[in-house]
Image (cartoon, helix red, strand yellow):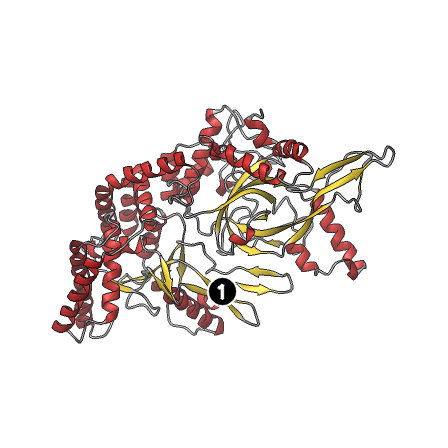
Amino acid sequence: MPCVADWLNNPFSIVQGIFAQNVPNSDWEKKVTEYFKEKLKENNATNWVPSLNDVPVHYLKPNSLVKFRCMVQDMFDPEFYMGVYETVDPNTNARVLHFGKYRDVAECGPQQEIDLNSSQTVTSERQTFYCVPVPGESAWSVVVLNLQFYAYISASQARVSPSTSYTPSRHKRSYEEDEDMDLHPSKQKEQHMGNSSGGDIHGCVEPKRLETEASAGHHLISPNCSPPLDLNFPLPGEKGPACLVKVYESWDTFKVNDVLEVYGILSVDPVLSIVNNEERDSSVLDPMECMDTAEEQRVHSPPASLVPRIHVILAQKLQHINPLLPACLNEEESKTCEYLNLTSLFVSNFMSELSPVRAELLGFLTHALLGDSLAAEYLILHLISTVYARRDVLPLGKFTVNLSGCPRNSIFTEHIYRIIQQLVPASYRLQMTIENMNHSRFIPHKDYTANRLVSGVLQLASNTSLVVDETQLEQGQLDTTGVHNVTALGNLITWQKVDYDFNYHQMEFPCNINVLITSEGRSLLPSDCQVHLQPQIIPPNMEEYMNSLLTAVLPSVLNKFRIYLSLLRLLDYSISDEVTKAVEEDFVEMRKNDPESITADDLHRTLLVARFLSLSAGQTTLSRERWLRAKQLEALRKARLQQQKCVNGNEL
């Protein structure tokens, strides 16, 4: 029986064994998939597999099994390959069958040639996805995944062997220390400077994603490409590996912007760079040899050392990217009865302590919002909101909140974003300045010369928290790009879609992005709910106040907050016929008492508030009590807006 080292370090040996036993039967491919699927079901087996998100490519053994948590940024055209081919020895005429699946380059032994006219040749098709790390993924999420992997490494007394091209120089830290570094970047800088001249005496230090990137931005200098290779990350300043992910089965179930976790064979064969260079050189001499443009070849076939290939054996679309939760939380996605039981146990155990977690989170956010408990309530509702269905073009469940009354040009909004960063798995702060509006690329567009989708800021994974900071906006003139960007933001908020630019037409890409707008007055952008901030305390030093707030929260408590917000998004919700009738009667009564100010929009918003209030308490159906509480919150919110309007003499 193969040991762990076989299927992890040398998966080709497993594939070869199954291929040899089953040829010419075509079932060998299914048996390979089933073999690895069973292996990964074993206890914590998924944690044994090194992740490209956390381990540098040069730490990983070529042709070993790896995993990659990623977002599909682009889909290339399908490609044909030799699924099975035959080699012949010219001297002895001995023939050998080989599999081409999971390979970039067909292999044959010494003194062997590939027989291109063999009747045994099987031509197959595969789909290539260009994948990037999840845009805006929070540092704490990466830390948790690192810990899961290195817990196995430590337990098995194993280490990933570094190559001579990389010398690690950072000591291993505890989870609490990692959390502390995330909350206080200045400490991380100090520690890095303090350790710059020293290293681990054993030479075995766990690499971290954020310290081992080959580049600090979008571009990498490739020895074979000039100008620098653009990795096409949606967000500025992003780091991480981009990969060409080659999928062999059911690729039509995946689409652009899906978040995947793939398990496959890592290919960083230097031959790929040589072949690609030869193709580019030959195409200059003979244009008929290749129909692709030089730019398209450069983008679609980058050096494997910079953009490695993963030949997928197993892939799944992720419901969420919170590593503190089980990967699948519904029965359809759960793989086994045992897994389903463990998942149900996890959910039931957490739901039993939901009430104190909610109370702690409410207190934490109330302090963050300077003592405003009403704003904290609405922020919780916003953070657990999600688009759960679409009726025609209307997205149901979106809950964009405009937090007005924020101090202008203050570090307050920056710290609010830092707190949200610590609570959600993926987020981005969009500073709404004239400069950003006029010069940033918000909408992805098709580059037909390179035959690729050029990314934009609004190409984000589902359930990403987008914080739009309007307090940065000053007087100025929006140019054509700025107007298009503001329009795109408005469409994202209203319709939860982004219209990608394909030059001759636009294509709608539905999305599910939580948008929080911070502004001084009422936002220029649309929103589902405006909450005016009423600070109860004014800290003399905002920086110290916010830092002390984050420092006071234990990592274990932060983890409970993170689980709470992610888990509640995934719960089902319903309203009984009895409660529906009571709500309708109540709304009719409200219209009778105040026909001028109570509208259908008010009913829709109050139902949304009631939905998220119920879910925030762990209740999956609406009760009379929650409906009344929702009406109370809405009345308080409206009264505050009316009061502010009277004070300022204009509409907020």
* Among the 4 quarters of the image, the one containing residue 83: top right
Please indicate, yes or no, whether residue 299 appears anywhere in the rendered image.
Answer: yes
Q: Position of residue 364 (x, y in %)?
A: 25, 47
Instruction: Work out which quarter of the rendered image holds the C terminus and state it.
Output: bottom left
Q: Is residue 232 left or right of residue 282?
A: left
- Compared to 198, does 522 lie above or below? below
Residue occupying the far front of the picture: 25
Instruction: Work out which quarter of the rendered image holds the N terminus and state it.
Output: top right
Crowd class of label 1 (few under 14; some 14 to 19; many from 20; radius 10 Å) = many
Q: Pick the residue in front: 493 or 263.
A: 263
Total numbered circles: 1
Q: Position of residue 624 (x, y in %)?
A: 16, 56
Give me the residue at 15% from left, 54% from top: 625
Q: Position of residue 245 (x, y in %)?
A: 58, 47
For disc 1, the marked residue is 443
Q: Is residue 59 left or right of residue 529?
A: right
- Compared to 112, does 378 lie above or below? below
Give me the residue at 41% from left, 38% from top: 144
Q: Is residue 564 left or right of residue 374?
A: right
Give the amino acid at mark 1: Ile
